[in-house]
Amino acid sequence: MLPAFFVAVMLVAVVAVGAKVMSRNGSGANSLAQALDALPRSGSVALIVQEHENIIVMDAAVKTLAVASKPTTVNPAQVIASQNAAANSSSSSTSTTTVSAPPPDPGTAQNIGYTMLPQFGFNQTTQWSCLLDLWNRESGWLYDAENPSSGAYGIPQALPGDKMASAGADWQTNPATQIKWGLGYISQVYGTPCNAYNFDVANGGY
């Protein structure tokens, strides 16, 4: 078996050298595969051919595995930045903001509302502009504003208007009574004037 193997190897070498010498451009049958094809297919030669093919297949498999198994690297900073951008985009699309407003003129209904905010636990700096815009939308801060369709009445547009009687018997004509009731309603239902304003903008009413 072993002498036959060496004979086959010698034959391959002889054929390869002979093909290279005989070729006009020097390229000839200069590969192992071409040399093997030129040999008579004895058992030893067939074994060498099979081993050569196995080596080719294994080499291709190793290269494929090296590419497929290469881990994908992720930059943590990019992931965090992407999450922050998505969160900022979501919050900006669902929230409504208002511009800060200065304190109103004394003696007006707006001044009454501004003064009453702390009595209900509301911060004048952060909540006044929301209350101002809310009741500008609802009634224009007019104590006798009445919605002809629904019957809502007064500065906070209570529906029905006589709900405000719980804050005072003069609810029909007294802005302070209406504002007192309106701030109590906002506190119980929405928590803050800004929450009420955002809801009003989104739903056309509060």
Image (cartoon, rainbow, N blue to C red):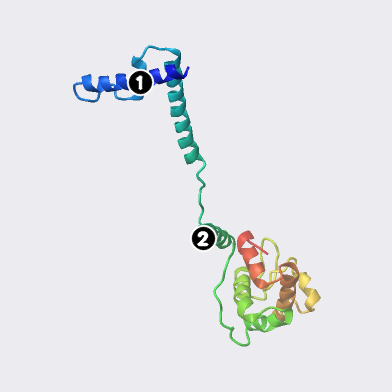
- Name the residue nearer the viewer: 36 or 128: 36
Q: Residue at x 67, y 84 (%)?
A: 115
Q: CA distance from mark 1 to mark 2?
A: 62 Å
Which residue is under mark 2?
77
Mark carried by residue 151: none
Label 1 secondary element: helix
Q: Residue at x 73, y 66 (%)?
A: 159
Where does residue 48 sit, x and y in percent of width and height? 43, 21
Q: Residue at x 67, y 83 (%)?
A: 112
Where does residue 205 sit, x and y in percent of width and height? 65, 63
Which residue is under mark 1?
10
Q: Is residue 39 left or right of residue 83?
A: left
Outermost residue on the bottom side: it is: 106
Mark 1 or 2: the one toward you? 1
Label 2 secondary element: helix
- Name the residue nearer the viewer: 123 or 104: 123
- Name the residue nearer the viewer: 22 or 182: 22
Q: Is residue 36 left or right of residue 81?
A: left
Task: Say what amino acid the circle numbered 1 marks.
Answer: Met
Q: Quadrant of residue 121?
A: bottom right
- Name the residue nearer the viewer: 133 or 174: 133
Task: Say what amino acid the circle numbered 2 marks.
Answer: Ala
Q: Earlier in the sequence, mark 1 or mark 2?
A: 1
Q: Is residue 101 left or right of residue 49?
A: right
